[in-house]
Amino acid sequence: MLRVAIIYYMWPHYRSAVVEALDRSERIAYTFMGSGETFEGIPHMGPERFRRFRRAPFRRIRGRFFWQSEAVRAALSQDFDAIIYLADPNILSNWMAAGLSRLRRVPVLFWGHGWRKPERGVKRLFRNAYYRLSNRLLVYTERAKRLGTETGFPAARITTVYNSLDLHAADKVVARIEAGTLTDIDPRALFAERDRPLLICTARLIAACRFDLLIDAASLLAARGKPMNVLLVGDGPVREEITALARERGVDLHLYGACYDEEAIGQLIYGADLTVSPGKIGLTAMHSLMYGTPAITHDNLDQQMPEVEAINPGTTGLLFAQGDARSLADAIEGWFAEKRDRATDRVTARAEVHAKWNPDVQAGIIEEAVIDLIGCVRPASPVLVRSDKPA
């Protein structure tokens, strides 16, 4: 069995599903390396969630830069047949570690967003110099691959692996909702006018999410005779500001608060009509689609997160002109004007995540990329035939 390290500075709790999918491999024994500590309020996966976990503490260097000594030690060790590093050039130790791995003919893969927008000048040179330390770059989207090739990075060295949340858990929640055995939360019951269309977003209440645009759009729709209910699931520093704005605009808003119970979140999203994320959408798109709810977000892809690629306008959601409340109102109104069948929309939304944006797809693509790369970089190495070493 091949032995491969995946080195992140920390493993967020929402990565658990893809970690478990990778751990199920019968051809690769993965060792996951990370700090094991909560970082910036994001919990680290517990070490017991991994089949093989090795602590790799990191330290900050002047704000946004990091150093992780265990990454360098892993590069110098005889423990691994290939190493996957986080594709973040701000982790300075990865420059040295990847370089040492390449010198030792240990295949190197980088895993991350990749290119999110066209870049020029020093930033473009810096990113491309880092990425070229890898033999293979694993990116989230086809757009990232296209942007990369436009900078001159070889297309053959870029593999799209998508992104995901725990689709298996979501499938179980949806099955129970549709079987009528999970019915303790009805999001429409949170509002006096239950028959209005219900707009939802599950995200922290921060300025970057631009929930002010959602309130303004809902106000415009009410003035057009099409009032909406707005449900925000989360908490954060703009809570009072959003509450005051909704009161001023006469928008029926319910703030559910922070919620980490997936059964509750699933019922809330499943029972809504549309997710509306006026700022970047990110993994909120995955969360929404896997519970069968289409999503609306802004159209400036250079300022979006990779997961926006899962939104296919007219089928799994819509895009509106960034920063324009009237455009957002038009998009919401247009969606409902089509007299859509909610059951069909649920099937379409969930089909998108089942096709590409799920842990099994991710793990499978990564596994094939690793095996292919080892065969290309070290074709004569005994690593390809050894099976007597412990995993």
Image (tube, rainbow, N blue to C red):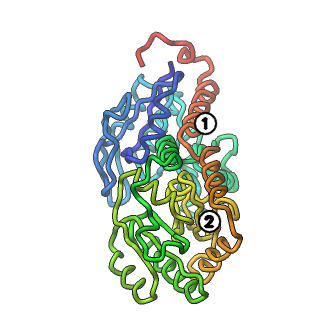
The residue under the point 52% across, 42% down is: 110
The x, y position of residue 349, in whole percent, is 62, 54
Query: Which is nearer the eye, 350 or 239?
Result: 350
Query: Which is nearer the eye, 376 or 113?
Result: 113
The residue under the point 40% across, 73% down is: 254
| Residue 54 location, quadrant | top left
The reply to whether residue 165 is visible in this rendering is: no
Kindly check if marks 2 and 1 are in contact, taking CB atoms under 8 A apart as contact.
Answer: no
The x, y position of residue 201, in whole percent, is 47, 66
The reply to whether residue 188 is visible in this rendering is: yes
The x, y position of residue 63, in whole percent, is 33, 61
Residue position for label 1: 365
The disc placed on residue 301 is 2
Q: Looking at this rendering, what residue extends furthest in the front direction?
A: 180
In the structure shown, which secondary structural element does the residue marked by tag 2 occupy?
helix
Q: Earlier in the sequence, mark 2 or mark 1?
A: 2
Q: Give the quadrant of the C terminus.
A: top left
The disc placed on residue 70 is none
Q: Looking at this rendering, what residue extends furthest in the top direction?
A: 388
**Real-space CA distance between mark 2 and mark 1, rounded to the nearest whole angstrom:** 25 Å
